[in-house]
Image: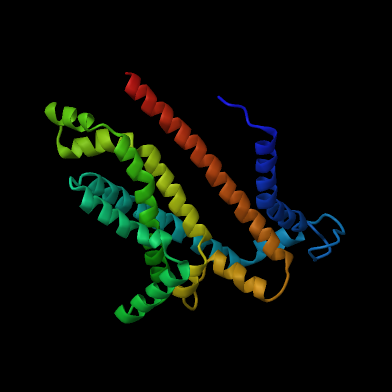
Amino acid sequence: MKKLSGFSIAYLVLVFVVLYAPIFYLIFYSFNSGGMMHHFEGFTLKWYKELFDDMRLFIIVLNTIIVALLSAFIATIIGVLGAISISMFQKKKWKNGILSLNNVLIVSPDVIIGASFLILFTIIGIKLGFVSVLLSHIAFSIPIVVIMVLPKLQEMSVNLVDAALDLGASWKDVLTKVILPYISPGIYAGFFMALTYSLDDFAVTFFVTGNGFTTLSVEIYSLARRGVSLNINALSAILFLFTLLLVVGYYFINRRTSKGSNMGVNK
């Protein structure tokens, strides 16, 4: 393995400083008793206390988590089935065509996607609120799951499926005992990516949310427009910590799954 040069290390450090310095600056001032984003006067947990005492914000957090978990779960099921279906196409032209359609929602600007969903829900008569937000998050999460699962399916040897069928396994057994265990790292990756995208999404949610229902991203935007408040810093710090826990959780789950797969292959 080649060692990183001094320039490479310096470049990586610079990239991480640019990425994380604003976040740590924001978190640092969430403990400022002065109530401003400059001149740190003293340590306080007042802004976090106000945050946890706000029942309306608690409901918004609950809404955000429910939408994220539901949309990620449903999108993972549909995305896994879609990826398996795409991998079974024999003609490369059809496979590439469907993959191109799948990637449209990933490469399209969020503003266009949000406006499109808004027009669609208005035409078909779906009231803007929980259902519209959930359907939108499922829709833009499915392509992400497909992209994460498909490489694992392409790595899997066709001989595994053929051997299982030759030994008398049904297609249900092949799916549940051969294919799904093999691609489980991709499934976990797709689920956590969909969960993260749902938690972070603002543009699409802003278009399809209605009166009486909102998510954290939209609420933070509304709070920021009213002026600087360290409640936003405290909320953002908690969100960053939660996202960090998701990443760490995914790392350990993926590591455990990979070890299990390797042990299965060795046996």
Residue 107: x and y in percent read: 42, 60
Instruction: Name the residue rendered at 35%, 41% in the picture.
Output: 151
Query: Quick check: 240 above or below 202?
Result: above
Where's the C terminus, which quadrant? Answer: top left
Q: Is residue 65 visible?
A: no
Colour convention of the picture: rainbow
Residue 218: x and y in percent read: 55, 69
Relative to 151, 24 lies left or right:
right
Instruction: Name the residue rendered at 41%, 69% in the picture.
Output: 113
Query: Quick check: 226 above or below 252?
Result: below
Relative to 186, 241 lies left or right:
right
Q: Quadrant of residue 11?
A: top right
Instruction: Name the residue rendered at 30%, 39% in the picture.
Output: 153
Number of on-image labels: 0
Residue 28: x and y in percent read: 76, 54
Instruction: Name the residue rendered at 53%, 59% in the picture.
Output: 200
Q: Is residue 163 visible?
A: yes
Where's the N terminus, which quadrant? Answer: top right
Q: Nearer the viewer, residue 156 or 125?
A: 156
Residue 260: x and y in percent read: 39, 27
Q: Quadrant of residue 181?
A: top left
